[in-house]
Amino acid sequence: MITFITGNKHKVIEAENIFKDYDINLEHIDLGYCEPQGTLEEVAISGAKYASRKLNKPVIVEDAGLFIKALKGFPGTYSSYVQETLGNQGILKLLDGVNDCYAEFRSVIGYCAPNSEPKIFLGKVIGEIAVEEKGDLGFAFDPIFYVPAEGKTFGELTTEEKNQFSHRKNSLEKFIKWYSIQ
């Protein structure tokens, strides 16, 4: 059993679908924690350490962000805030007339057990920002994150399709492989 600390139900659904392939049960706890201003790695380390000490058990937390090359990595670690304030249309406006729409979704899993130091696992997926929103599946930036290899945005992919190669799948798989040999 792995305890996943998050307030994001969409992340829980994606993680449950990934963990079931490895026959690992996932417990979900929505335990708020203070996120330091910093990198995805720093947020994951801080959150995992706090939650494992508070609950006195091993936990994982996940921090993710959309990094757009033409915007010098923005929104990056501020993705959640930018999604709430600017939204997808705001990002599309910022990129109006920009030719290079290269982007990465990154996910960092932070794992920590009580009385131990956190470990982190980075996953990413490469794509580009679409010229318009497409699809009503997924959440947040999914309808504008286009994956050329798939010919679709994340918003056009079911959770099962997205979980074949997503940034979260990559980081969770790295964690699972490490965890299974512990």
Image (spheres, helix red, strand yellow):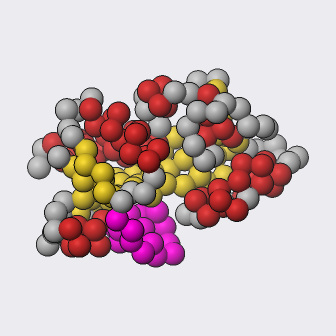
- 178 sits to left or right of 12: left
The image shows residue 100 at horizontal and vertical percentages of: 76, 44
Quadrant position of residue 79: bottom right
Is 76 or 2 nearer to us in this picture? 2
Q: Number of numbered discs present?
A: 0
Q: Which residues are magenta?
A: 31-47
Q: Quadrant of residue 63?
A: bottom left
Q: Residue farthest to the left?
A: 182
**Residue 177 sits above or below residue 7 on the image:** above
106 or 78: nearer the viewer:
78
Vertical side of 37 occupied by 158: above or below: above
Measuring 20% from the left and 38% from the top, which residue is drawn there?
24
- Residue, x 21% and y 73% (percent of image)? 53
> Farthest residue in the right direction?
97
18 relative position to 81: left or right: left
- Residue 113, image x and y in percent? 18, 64
How far across and how far down the image is residue 120, in percent?
Answer: 32, 58
Inspect the magenta stretch and tell me whether residue 40 lies in it: yes
- Residue 69 visible in image: no
Q: Is residue 31 left or right of residue 55?
A: right
What percent of the width, then of the height, locates residue 43? 42, 68
Judge whether residue 71 can be spotted in this image: yes
Q: Is residue 22 magenta?
A: no
Q: Nearer the viewer, residue 88 or 96?
A: 88
Q: Residue at x 65, y 59 (%)?
A: 84
Q: Residue at x 34, y 65 (%)?
A: 31
